[in-house]
Image (spheres, rainbow, N blue to C red):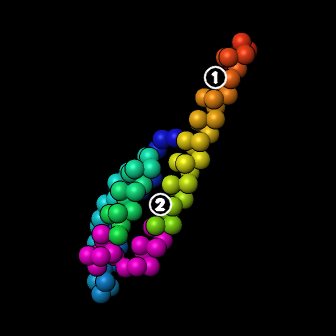
Amino acid sequence: MSGRFMSGRLTSRRRHGHGREAFELPDTTDLDSVNAAQVALIRLVAENRIGAREALYISRMLEHRRRAIGTATLWQKMQELEAQGRQMKGEAP
């Protein structure tokens, strides 16, 4: 499964309500990049660049992305194993 999820710039209200601050998270194309995005999100909260509520919303999206990648990876592996099984039996693909 490919595609871009949390790419580009996101904006956040500044802590005191004045303007918006842009920040970037890594593209989430695999599980390692989802983990990197979660670490970056935690860092943004620790640096007071975004609030905890906003981080919660983004972390929920990242968790859904992690699950989707895991499901797609499992599905692909199952397809490969089924093809290998058919090949061992001498069946057509």
Q: Is residue 20 visible?
A: no
Left or right: 89, with 38 as reference point: right
Residue 78 placement (x, y as % from top left): 64, 35
Residue 1: image x %, image y %?
A: 52, 41
Q: Position of residue 67 (x, y in %)?
A: 56, 54
- Residue position for label 1: 84
Q: Residue at x 54, y 59 (%)?
A: 64
Task: Identify the residue position indicated by label 2 in the image.
Answer: 62
Q: Given contact means CB atoms under 8 Å apart, are the residues at marks 2 and 1 in contact?
A: no
Can you say whether 54 is above or below 28 in the image?
below
Front-most of residues 22 and 1: 1
Residue 57 seen by the camera: yes
> Residue visible at 30% across and 71% down?
44
> In percent of the image, x 48 and y 71: which residue is there?
57
Q: Secondary structure at mark 1?
A: helix
Above or below: residue 91 compared with residue 31: above
7 left or right of 18 in image:
right
Q: Residues within 10 Å of mark 2 (few under 14, many from 20)?
A: many
Q: Nearer the viewer, residue 21 or 70?
A: 70
- Dominant SS of magenta comes to helix
Q: Is residue 4 magenta?
A: no
How crowded pointer 1 is (Cα within 10 Å; few <14, some 14-19, many 20+) is rated as some
Kindly indicate the quadrant of the structure image that contains residue 88: top right
**Residue closer to the observer: 3 or 32:** 32
Highlighted magenta segment, given as a residue range: 43-58
Q: Quadrant of the C terminus?
A: top right
